Image (spheres, rainbow, N blue to C red):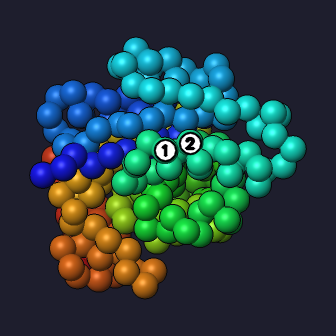
Amino acid sequence: MERLRLAVLASGRGSNLQALIDAIAGGQLAAAIVGVFSDKPDAPALERARHAGLPARALRPRDFATRLEYDQALFEQIDQTGADLIVCAGYMRLISQPQVQPRVGRMLNIHPSLLPAFKGLHTHQQALDAGVDVHGASVHFLAPELDGGPVISQARVPALTDDDAATLGRRVLAREHPLLVQTLRLFAAARVALVDGVVHVDGHAMHAPLQLDQDDRLVHAAGAR
Ligand code: GRF
């Protein structure tokens, strides 16, 4: 079977990108990263990509007059890679509608909260401020609205009474990596699709996101199918 071709967008540290690189190298993910793109020329994510021998490129927003022009140039380059799937892994810029719209169903994002709770930035602090017991991360299809598309999978982590945003964030990040890898394994096996705005897994409409269990398997949420 053809390997799934991934383009990855990242603005910073790139630990999720690294998890993908490692999973592919270790034979756990039948995919190939065909390009890594960033809005930040000094992003450690680009360094990680180059270290792994992957094509990596930054486009600087300030070299473009508008967001629309920036995104058009970026996505022209992404399209040239022939990517099947575009994965936003810590990409910290809004992507404009004209680029998202035609690619709905082919673009994913990983977000550090149990969506729809805590969209936007500072999600760990938002979770602590709200006093939740359970926090986590989500992988979702991109939709034009921020952090808004259909959620495919989630990893839950406890929020502890003595947590601050940093300790909670570290615990979430540790689960983001297997969450992203396992979710992309489903795509690599052609088991996921977005049909009329609804996530389908193995041909069945999902009424709740898949959940990452203790053994790093994605399972149906209790009572859901
Ligand atoms: C992760 O928490 C991801 O969920 C969020 O940005 C962070 C990126 O971390 N969108 P890294 O660059 O992958 O280490």
User: Secondary structure under badge 1?
Assistant: helix
Rendered position, 221 above or below 19: below
The type of residue carrying mark 2 is: Gln
Q: Is residue 190 left or right of residue 159?
A: left
* Disc 2 + disc 1, Cβ < 8 Å: yes
Judging depth in this view, the residue of 7 and 164 nearest the camera is 7
Q: Quadrant of residue 212?
A: bottom left
Farthest residue toward the right? 65
**Percent of width and height locating residue 198:** 40, 80
Q: Mark yes or no: residue 26 visible.
A: yes
Residue for badge 1: 80
Rendered position, 199 above or below 29: below
Residue drawn at point x = 45 percent, y = 80 percent: 197
Q: Is mark 1 within 8 Å of ligand 1?
A: no
Q: Residues within 10 Å of mark 2 (few under 14, many from 20)?
A: some
**Percent of width and height locating residue 49:** 43, 23
The type of residue carrying mark 1 is: Gln
> Residue 114's mark?
none
Rendered position, 72 above or below 177: below
User: Secondary structure under badge 2?
Assistant: helix
Q: Is residue 95 left or right of residue 219?
A: right
Judging depth in this view, the residue of 138 and 162 nearest the camera is 138
Q: How far apart in space, not on screen, are marks 2 and 1 (Cα)?
A: 5 Å
Q: Is residue 212 left or right of residue 177?
A: left
Rendered position, 66 above or below 171: below
Residue drawn at point x = 18 percent, y = 58 percent: 189
Residue drawn at point x = 68 percent, y = 50 percent: 71
Q: Residues within 10 Å of mark 1 (few under 14, many from 20)?
A: few
Residue for badge 2: 77
